[in-house]
């Protein structure tokens, strides 16, 4: 891991990016297609990986390095067998209970609710909007 004062070179960033996709052995057997590894964090939060049929999701965390430069840490996870990441609830769910994967990006804004005090995580409008996607 090294010292907190360590600066990150381009090779460190590339290594970190590769490590983002270190999933447990055998994970590829559960995927519908070969693992796509070109996801880029659009901001802080939890994101369904649409290119991986939402079977994979990413946790993105923005950090400031000791030299003052910004970086985004990306952690990659896989949902359990026969489940997908639901961008509305930010959990793994059965596909019929989740926002359709192709529409997940339309719910990336839910990440803006994380950490907001005295506010519901989801509004009634969010739930109605998701229901329309699930039925349509």
Image (tube, rainbow, N blue to C red):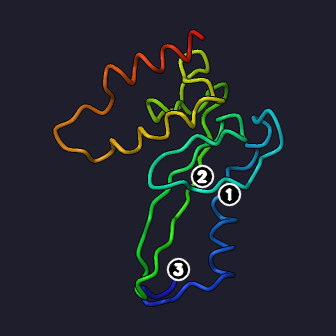
Judged left or right of residue 26, residue 69 is left
Q: Would you name the residue on which mark 1 appears?
A: 22
Asked if the residue at tag 1 contacts the one at tag 2, i.e. Cβ–Cβ closer than 8 Å, the answer is yes
- Residue 42 percent across, percent down from the top left: 54, 54
Disc 1 on helix, strand or loop?
A: loop
Q: Give the label, 2 or 3, closer to the camera.
A: 2
Q: Would you name the residue on which mark 2 appears?
A: 76
- Residue 52 percent across, percent down from the top left: 72, 40
Q: Earlier in the sequence, mark 2 or mark 1?
A: 1
Q: Would you name the residue on which mark 3 appears?
A: 1
Disc 2 versus disc 3: distance between alpha carbons? 19 Å
Disc 3 versus disc 1: distance between alpha carbons? 17 Å
- Above or below 99: residue 43: below
Name the residue at the left extreme. 118
Q: Give the label, 2 or 1, closer to the camera.
A: 2
Q: Residue at x 63, y 29 (%)?
A: 101
Disc 2 versus disc 1: distance between alpha carbons? 7 Å
């Amino acid at each position: 891991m090294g010292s907190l004062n360590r600066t990150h070179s381009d090779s460190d960033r590339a290594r970190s990016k590769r490590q983002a996709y270190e999933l447990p052995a055998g994970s590829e057997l559960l995927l519908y297609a070969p693992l796509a590894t070109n996801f880029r964090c659009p901001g802080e939060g939890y994101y369904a990986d649409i290119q991986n049929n939402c079977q994979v999701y990413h946790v993105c965390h923005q950090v400031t390095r000791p030299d003052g430069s910004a970086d985004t840490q990306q952690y990659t996870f896989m949902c359990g067998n026969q489940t997908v990441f639901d961008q509305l609830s930010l959990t793994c769910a059965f596909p019929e209970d989740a926002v359709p994967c192709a529409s997940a990006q339309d719910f990336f804004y839910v990440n803006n609710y994380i950490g907001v005090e005295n506010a519901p995580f989801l509004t009634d409008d969010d739930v109605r909007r998701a229901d329309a996607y699930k039925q349509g």
